[in-house]
Amino acid sequence: MGKTKHTGPIKLDTSWKPSLWASLVPLGLGKVKPHHIRDTMKLVYENRDNLPYAWRILTQGVCDGCALGVSGLHDQTLTGPHLCTTRLSVLRLNTMPALDPKWLEDVDELRKLDSAQLRKLGRIPYPLSRKPGEKRFRRISWDEALDRIAAKIKAIDPKQLAFYLTARGITNEVYYVAAKVARFLGTNNIDNAARICHSPSKTALKRSLGIAASSCSYKDWIGTDVLVFWGSVAANNQPVSTKYMYAAKKAGTKIILINPYREPAMERYWIPSIPDSALFGTKIVDDFYQVNIGGDIAFMNGVIKHWLEMEERQPGSAIDHRFVAEHTNGFAELKAHVAKYDWATLEKSSGLPRERIAEFAELLAKAKSGVFVWSMGLTQHRFGSDNVSQIANLAMLRGFIGREHCGVMPIRGHSGVQGSGEMGAEPMSLPGGAPLDEENIRRFEQLWGFAIPRWQGDIVGVTLENALLPDGHERKTRLFYTSGGNFLETMPDPGFVKTCLENVELRVHQDIILNTSTLVDAKEEVIVLPAMTRYEQPGGGTSTSTERMVYFSPEIPGPRIAEARAEWEIYIDLASRVYPERKHLISFADAQAIREEIALANPNYDGIQQLKKQGDVFQWGGAWLCEGGICPTPDGRGNLLPIELPELRKGEGEFYVTTRRGKQFNSMIFSKTDPFNAADRYDVLIHPEDAARLGIRDNEPIVLYNQYGTFQGRAKYAQTKPGNLQVYWPEGNVLIPKGVYEAEAGIPEYNTAVKVEKAESFFAEKDRKYVEKPVEEAELTL
């Protein structure tokens, strides 16, 4: 692979261009849109007790929000300062004081609060314990807490021990130490938040191109002919990226969104730091292609089919035959595979007519360059890896790989996620994504100096389910150690997840705040450990952005929670108590020593050891992976894969339904109202034609139900694809089936089919064959 490096950030063109304006009404008055200035003032007020420290975090630290990689107020893409309200919303987690101990006296009172209210109580002040039947959390010492956890680890089979790390501000150093400690303790049951977001991206890109990360950089958006977003609402989830899109529009790039919902945030956006956009907004997307939920594979097979028809009429008009011949395998097989599908089948599955599919195909065929960006709209399916391999197919057929303004990019929603798998914090690989085969295990045994378990670890969903296995089963989860995370608000079927959590003997919650899952009973004990934020960790830390930029974030002086500890230090202390005679094998003198070892463990990260001060950064792999078309596969070629159409399971009278995000960061909700469409958290986005057919009025109470659960909300007319509904996550998770995982990558399925009725008629009918259990009153409360 080449190692070409990008030059410095691009100078942003802020000249006014009225043809891009979204409205002639200044400041979007009367429009449904975010109110950036008002929100910023509110967040300044919330941080008023620690404003100097808050300012130092913003100007010196690497953003702990999304994975764009803003260091201080600057990034590697565009000149000028960058700041968004998402980062400001997360800021309070770093500046708030410890919670008042009075809240710890009555867990029933805490259970009356939702996670947003719990978050506002303040930081966890010291180690806590609560056993079954106890009404309060009891303060314990660090020694008492870690000794009890260590004793439990020594008393169980390593296969009954599991670790999980979320993406909440966690650094590469913490991921690496956790991955090493898990193996030191004899378990491969370790997983991370990427499992629930982008594991199919890694799996699919590995098999298609031999890579496990974005092949290009954000700068490649600016000036590419076509920038395509597949199931990704970057304007909502990565707000600073709207500046990149603005710059791309100025450079003549066409921006396309492929999504079941015509996302308002991508249609027009008021970018607060660009004068003409702040006043009149910017039209972001040039065209929307509204596919069915799960219809992307059929859509892409249709694109390839149209290209092949173009080639029959005029060879070379759609496919880059030189790139395909020199740099890919499998073209003949892919061609034969696509030929077997008739247009009627592709139209029905995708939800788009042949003419619209052909329109998109010809747009790509005429483009000299293209970048494909996707997120959870593609990955969170039981066929997520196939969705992503289809994107790789399109990119290879057009030669959009390994050069400027071209590439495939799984855009990350959290600043810590990209590094998690690259540090080995997952059940099926070691640092660097090295598979758990004998060769790699021996290499790491030589590096680490201790034996590594050779059995396959469990993904986190299975770990939770394993808590329900009978006593004596070697895989029964008896100790579950989580660094952050709230499975009650991230996994399908929250009631089932609660039962799983209650059946773990000892649960450890290492975190900075309480959430609803912290309050769930355990069979023997719940122990809560107060963690430092990334900005408090001695020696600083690093995080990896979507585009593989590894940034150094320094320790920032400021107030501290007296008993909070750096997360990597906690893991090492615990492991040392389990096997004190071998603790020298797991010890690190400081954060710099961890970075030194990371550079040895993961060759891609050779350079991380040089990051020591604010602003230090390097991009592993160079500007483009697969540069010049040479892939890191055994033969150096990419693999074109024939992808079968998935079975879209929707019965007569049913709708496809998927989950979406509002004003939130992961499961942390900051507003009950979506600022882009004014929807409430319990609103169901439904096309007016579908609603009219069912006699449902706008804002009328309705019920969605299937064999998995029941959801009551209100109809909200929206420009969704007819036959497709959207509910908010995690509120809509009651409808999602438990235990359904993508075969290749293990991601949970977050889509299903439902029936819809008016609430009045639903509750008038007594016998509901689709409802497995009575609807509790709490479920009916809006």
Image (cartoon, rainbow, N blue to C red):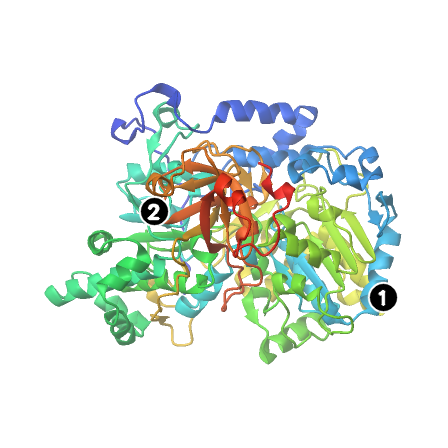
Give the farthest residue toward the left.
313
Q: Judge whether residue 299 can be spotted in this image.
A: no
Element at label 1: helix
Give the total number of marks visible in the rendering. Answer: 2
Please give left or right for residue 210 compared with residue 488 in the image.
Answer: left
Give the quarter of the figure containing the N terminus: bottom left
Q: Nearer the viewer, residue 400 or 157?
A: 157
The disc at residue 495 is none
Q: Nearer the viewer, residue 514 or 609?
A: 514
Q: Nearer the viewer, residue 259 or 279?
A: 259
Dot 2: few (<14), some (14–19), or many (≥20) neighbours within 10 Å?
A: many
Please give left or right for residue 249 compared with residue 604 in the image.
Answer: left
Front label number (2 vs 1): 2
> Would you identify the image quadrant in which residue 669 lies?
top right
Determine the CA span between mark 2 and mark 1.
62 Å
Q: Estimate the x, y position of residue 457 in percent, counting from the top left.
A: 64, 70
The disc at residue 580 is 1
Q: Estimate the x, y position of residue 171 in percent, counting from the top left.
A: 63, 51
Q: Amino acid at mark 1?
A: Pro
Please give left or right for residue 426 compared with residue 308 in the image.
Answer: right
Q: Nearer the viewer, residue 593 or 224?
A: 224
Q: Image point 43% across, 41% down: which residue?
A: 685
Q: Amino acid at mark 2?
A: Pro
Q: Estimate the x, y position of residue 38 in percent, counting from the top left.
A: 52, 22
Residue behind mark 2:
722
Give the quarter of the figure containing the C terminus: top right
**Which is nearer the N-term, disc 2 or disc 1?**
1
Q: Judge whether residue 122 can be spotted in this image.
A: yes
Dot 1: few (<14), some (14–19), or many (≥20) neighbours within 10 Å?
A: few
Q: Image point 67% across, 42% down: which residue?
A: 555
Element at label 2: loop
Q: Estimate the x, y position of residue 643 in percent, counting from the top left.
A: 35, 68
